[in-house]
Amino acid sequence: MGKLKMSLRKKTVIAITLISALLATVAIVLSYRIYCDTMDDHYKKLASNVAKTAASQMNGDVLGNYLVTMETDEEYDRMYDILMDIKENNDVEWLYIQKLDLEAMTGTYIIDADVAETACPLGETGPIAETAIPYLDTLEEGIPPFITDTEDFGWICTSCEPIFDSNGDVAAIACVDISMNEVMEDRHDFLMVMGIAITITALLAILALAALISVSIVNPINRLAKATGSFIQDKEKASTAISELNIHTGDEIENLSHSVKRMERDINEYIDNLTRITAEKERISAELNVATQIQASILPSIFPPFPDHEEFSIYAVMNPAKEVGGDFYDFFLTKQGKLAVVVADVSGKGVPAALFMVIAKTLIKNHAQSGESPAEVFENVNRQLCENNDAGMFVTSWLGILDLDTFEMTFANAGHNPPVRKKKGETFDYIKTRPDFILAGMDGVRYHNQQLSLAKGDILYIYSDGVTEATDIHEEMYGTERLKAVLEQSAEQPLDTMLKTVRDDIDTFGKGAPQFDDITMLGLRLK
């Protein structure tokens, strides 16, 4: 067993600690926030109620006169006494009446309920607090309570209410300031006590959870790990460490223990089966390698194949999708001295297609060498392939027989892809003719000969559908137009290079997608 970077117990403790710390932090923050909001709301409501009470006891019809005469009277003293009583009974720091000048943005004191030397006398003017400015346009509704941290007096909760005269106009405002310095100190004490309490609770929870997890999870898992670590050493023993596991936690750990015991039995059975299957696969693989070599030897592989015939050059390749494939190509001289070229594609892949390919190739070559025309070759081969074709396999094929004296080619197409031809001085183009029916598909099918006039410098490219139907990782096909473009770019290259260029372009197009079909290509150039 390798050395652990960090044990499950440590990870568990760390995870529980982090989660507890997070929960504790959230609990402290929320508790502190709720406490602060509650106290703020309490003092704002208190300040607002005191301001409303003071405003209701003031005589709005006479307040403005005192700023004109700058003299007080009995009514002034009465209102002053009322404000002092309100202030003393509600633990208010400051309670005063002001008249606001909205143009000058100043407030002038009319009554300041204060006996200290710092009391503002009648007529003293000061700037309006910036916090109150947004509410000046709706002064008749009052200035909502707000809390500020002042440099001179500390934390203050302020509320202002309008005082109306008999005409319903705002004659002045009653303002209340309540000191919150003690409240702010209480907040810090609350935060400290809450933090200590939650931290202690979290630590106790961490220790309890860590112990519980260690007993119910970590220790049983360590026992499982130790038992599974000796699986290989105990394989030949009658009684293994896994089979002797005795874990009874009553939860998923116990289920895991039973699963590990079943897995040990299943793995042992699987290993035994795998040993037999591996030996069988190695035998089959060896036979397939031989089959691959046999198939490769069946196809012409020596180039140039006809050194005495300098009037043409020919090259062909076949790349099976599996170890062996169903595609094949062939070229040979008939008894009449003509050149026969054939490309075919057997349905399916693998060994069945390869066996059917050998039969089809042999039949086509035998009939073509005897002097039969392409149509006659296909009719006879089709009849023979249909006999006892219980597997329902079929073949597409293109066969052309070229007269080397006149360069006239007679060909027949049994459901195969149309070849591509390039005339000297022109571009590649597909030989589009109506194909006949596939071989081995139905007995009694008639095939037709067609003529193709070639000339010196012409190139004929014959291929299987594995070329144009090759797909990339997005399931898009290679296509006929891309094939024609690549052939055009490599037309001046030797045939072997030209075919390799096409294959390389297919691989580039595929972007790593697996080859699903055999790829066969044959090139013929008349010199």
Image (spheres, grey):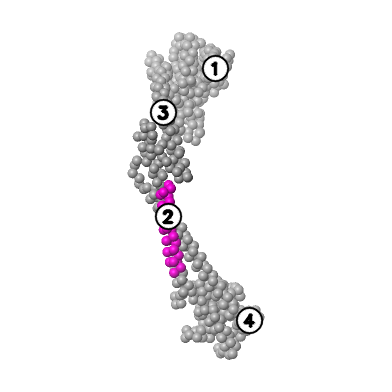
Q: Are the residues at dot 3 and dot 4 in contact (C-beta closer than 8 Å)? A: no
The quadrant of the picture occupied by the C terminus is top left
Mark-to-mark CA distance, 3 and 4: 105 Å
Q: Which mark is residue 272?
A: 3
Callout 2 amino acid: Ala
Q: Is residue 15 visible?
A: no
Q: Nearer the viewer, mark 3 or mark 4?
A: 3
**Residue 294 rendering spot, x and y as whole percentages:** 41, 18
Callout 1 amino acid: Asp
Q: Is residue 319 above or below residue 189?
A: above
Earlier sequence position, callout 2 versus callout 4: 4
Element type at marker 1?
loop
Element type at marker 4?
loop
Earlier sequence position, callout 3 versus callout 1: 3
| Quarter of the image where one finds residue 290 | top left
Q: Nearer the viewer, mark 3 or mark 2?
A: 2
Mark-to-mark CA distance, 1 and 4: 114 Å
**Residue 392 rendering spot, x and y as whole percentages:** 54, 19
- Residue 276 among magenta residues: no
Q: Which mark is residue 390?
A: 1
Q: Which mark is residue 208?
A: 2
Q: Are the residues at dot 3 and dot 2 in contact (C-beta closer than 8 Å)? A: no
**SS assignment for the magenta stretch, majority:** helix
Which region is colored magenta? Answer: 189-217
Q: Which residue is mark 4?
A: 165
Q: Are the residues at dot 1 and dot 4 in contact (C-beta closer than 8 Å)? A: no
In terms of depth relative to the viewer, which is nearer, 268 or 20?
268
Q: Give the residue at x 38% y 39%.
A: 227
